[in-house]
Image (tube, rainbow, N blue to C red):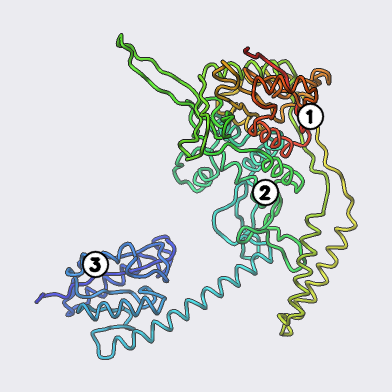
Amino acid sequence: MHSKVRVVGCGRQSVTRTEDENSLSISAQKRDLQYWVDTPGQNRLIVGWALDTNTSGTTNPFKREQLSPWLTERMDEWDVLAFPRIDRISRKVRYFSELLDWVEDNGKHIVTVDGSLNTQAAGGSAVAKVLSVLAEEEHRKIRKNVTNGMRTLRELGRFTGGPQPFGYLSVDSGDEHRILTPDPMYAELLLEIAKRVRAGDSTYAIADDFNRRGIMTWSDHLRSIKGKPIKGVLWKPATIARVIQNPVCVGYQTHNGEIWETEEGEPSIIADKAILKLGEWEAANKALASRTRLKKVRRRETACLLTGIAICGSCGSRMVCHHTTKTLKNGETKTYRDYRCTARNRSVACVSLSSVSETELEEVFAEALMDAIGYAPEMVKMVDPGEDHTAELDQKRQRLNKLETDYAEGKYDTDAKEQSYWRTLENLTKKIAELEARPVRPRMVTFQPTGRTWADKWKAMGTQDRREFLSERNVRVIVWRDPMPDVKRGAVVHFGNLKEFAIAGGVDGAELSDWGETGWNVPEHWMDPVPLMDPEQRAAIVATYGTVELPETLKKVRAKTRETFPEAASVFVSTLTTAA
């Protein structure tokens, strides 16, 4: 039998607080527990601590990081679990009862130092279960009050807490609540991001540029404001995308990922001044959404130029660059670098796996690209989204229909709810009338010269930037194995939406009549967009190639460009070289 009662001091805190903030701080709980243990004449001894921070009251005690080891592998080291008060044990009746049953089955006890619980006393367990019910009910009330309070703050356009969104700082609104105001430096940075996205810059290029310029990320900027050490976090393309997609750019309040609307049917404004105008934000997001992103491509400087751009003509699978090092008979080592179809890795059937030397394919591509557009002036595409309220009108009408349906089904069954219904109905009707009266301005697309040629731009870009540039414009290199008799490999370079930029750069229309694709070692009729109607010509092609039909992969790539870029829908072709 032990000379002293062995005690584990247990505490819990939902959110980490400063050491001296209030009695719920971990240090205050530990102090109360130590005072209880040191009470003269009680013969108690602290053998360990289980102080769980950032732990909800609804967490199962058997899953709490600090407490759970004392209930498993260390259960023989103690006699009593001591808590400051009952709500520090659990706010869930089910978990509380589970812990009470466990200590009873294992000859242990639970005590709260405020005197409300002691399982060693007669009827202690029964009292504890009653108290646990009260603790859970208190938790429900707290959650309801918090939910109602958050709703009120959203209605008032007040900051509800949490991380400060990019470009905004939380400040006192003057009514004991918080509101967002632009951070001078990062508001300018947000304006730059929006402008560059609208101009066609990739999120990768923007992130890379910010890293080169040594600009701190938003999270590090907030740490520096608070006097905390920065972590040196780097900008990432996904970070840039998330920044510009957030409605808070135009000052809108959000809840569960959706823009929060007031009873008047208007977005709740959470910022005292929006950084972006609505048109600027919408245009940037349309530009971002319209791009074809590179998927599952490893971001590393050693990645090959056409990874994610080159595809197999036989099955349409991506081609990736393989680097294989072999030792020759003379002892020298040689590295072979080639693009290969990935069908086998993806368990896709491919009747003719494509493979071509990295150097050969990239030289063919570079020559085709520079011949097509290298001499033309570089143009930046600027999109003015215009003014069209159709989407907002549809949203308001749908909300009005739902409101009237809910009223007809009796969901507004109290005086307060019915008053809210009539208020909302009046405001929605008024808002719809206002939107219907607003003018409609068409979308405008303009191109601005940068003062350099596309060849200059190409030379200035790194491998990653080049791949982003090509992918976003649906540029593709389609590679075939044995495309013609006695020819081992061939390709079609498809220029996607680059035709639009060539037109804007002033390339003559006559030149464009044979522009949009280049063939290398492929049948000439693949490059002819006009169906071959001459019987003798068709017969000669069938005799040589077996069919006049175009490869399905080539058809799909052309269709993708027509679908994604209507302005560059027509397919124009030329022939670079054709092996006999």
- Answer with the quarter of the image where residue 88 lies: bottom left
Indicate the position of residue 275 as horizontal and vertical percent values.
70, 46
Side of 575 relative to 163 (left or right) = right
As measured in the structure, the alpha-carbon distance from the residue carrying label 2 to the one carrying label 1 is: 25 Å
Q: Residues within 10 Å of mark 2 (few under 14, many from 20)?
A: many
At label 1, which amino acid type do we have? Phe
Mark 3 lies on residue: 72
Considering only vertical position in the picture, is 82 above or below 378? Answer: below
Q: Earlier in the sequence, mark 3 or mark 2?
A: 3
Q: Earlier in the sequence, mark 3 or mark 1?
A: 3
- Foreground mark, 2 or 1, reads 1
Q: CA distance from mark 3 to mark 1?
A: 69 Å
Which sits in the foreground, 171 or 366? 366
Q: Quadrant of the N terminus?
A: bottom left
Q: What residue would you read off at disc 1?
A: 447
Q: Is residue 30 left or right of residue 172?
A: left
Residue 249 numbered mark, or none: 2
Tell me the amino acid under the disc marked 3: Thr
Which quadrant would the C terminus be assigned to in this image? top right
User: Alpha-carbon neighbours of circle 3 within 10 Å: few (<14), some, or many (≥20)?
Assistant: few
SS at badge 3: loop
Count numbered badges in the picture.
3
Binning the other alpha carbons within 10 Å of mark 1 as few (below 14), some (14 to 19) or many (20 upward) gives some
N-terminal of the two: label 2 or label 1?
2
Quadrant housing residue 156: bottom right
Q: Where in the figure is residue 471, as x and y percent of width and height?
A: 62, 32
* Alpha carbons under labels 3 and 2: distance apart: 50 Å
Secondary structure type for disc 2: helix
